[in-house]
Amino acid sequence: MQSLLGHQPALVLKGCRFRLSNLTVAILGAGKIGSIMARSFSDCGIHVIATARSRERIEKLRMQGFEATSDNVYAVEKASVVFISVKPYQYPALAWQIGGHVSGKPVVSVMAGIPLRVLRKTLPGAEVYRAMPNLNAAVKRSATGLVAPSNAQYKELIKSILSCMGSVYELPEQLIDAWTAVAGSGPAIIAEFIDSMILAALAVGIPRDLAYDAVLESIIGTAEYLRTRPVHPAQLRDEVTTPGGTTIMALKIIEGKGMKSALIDAVEKATARARKLAREIEERIEEQHENSGAS
């Protein structure tokens, strides 16, 4: 950590979980999640260099107060830590650009599906990590999964940076695709459930604004209940359910429609998609390397 910052950084609780000064981070591909990361890191006192392809996007990033450029190599060379936030299909071209400039640096991929072995192969000399934050980073409540290499030199620094977005959970790599499906895709799945609950409230006559508040407060309260009183969700359900009452009637319909089965199937399919994506990207990178070697 000293080689990156010049001295041990002070970690101070302030707004986000840590404040990290004297550190420059590059975010390659500052789209939706990349921009959220940039804001979270900046709020922790980190200098962010964000990259994007379009002039319009670069100007928007600059208006938000970030240093922004289309030059990925420049960003990598200026930064102490590099985050890769491009779409997975864009990674082979990006790796070709920056592969000769990352040696000795920690590089964190937030791309779905691309395993450490591919990152190591295409980013020679870098200390590579995988991370999977989610959209809740926008309100500093991301549940971020982190896969670190063995004997990682910069793991605590990376965890500190990621903590600017919320909570960080270190995982074995074999779980990161499942984490992507559960925590990465989770906000979209939960939002779909919330929308369904609001529509249900409208169907029984509750005004939209009141329905919105009722559903959100019920979900936030339930999550807080389960966090502060660590009981199985089934126990909470049983505490609410009374014989012959309204809750058991609602649960009977949900069970009959197969909501649990649908959610399990959705997460399994999303996990399989992440794994398939990894294979496709690895094959594309192998093909690119073979073609470059032949030329």
Image (cartoon, rainbow, N blue to C red):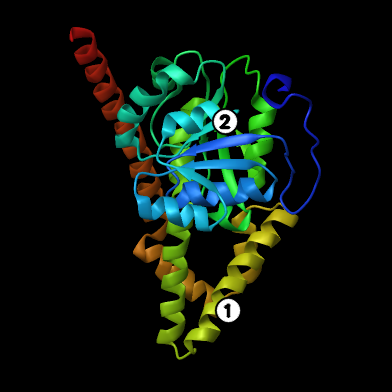
**Looking at the image, which residue is at 57% across and 54% down?**
65
User: Is residue 241 something that shows in the picture?
Assistant: no
Q: Which residue carries the number 1 mark? A: 214
Q: Is residue 76 left or right of residue 112?
A: right
Q: Amino acid at mark 2?
A: Ala
Q: Residues within 10 Å of mark 1 (few under 14, many from 20)?
A: some
User: Percent x, y for residue 113?
Assistant: 38, 33
Q: Amino acid at mark 1?
A: Ala
- Of the numbered discs in the image, which one, if any, rests on residue 79? 2
Task: Using the rendered view, name the quadrant where residue 295 is placed.
Answer: top left
Q: Is residue 93 above or below residue 188?
A: above
User: Percent x, y for residue 121?
Assistant: 40, 15
Task: Using the rendered view, name the quadrant where residue 138 is placed.
Answer: bottom right
Q: Is residue 8 above or below residue 31?
A: above
Instruction: Identify the image quadrant of the N terminus.
Output: top right
User: Could you tell me how far apart the alpha carbons at marks 2 and 1 are, in whole angstroms?
Assistant: 45 Å
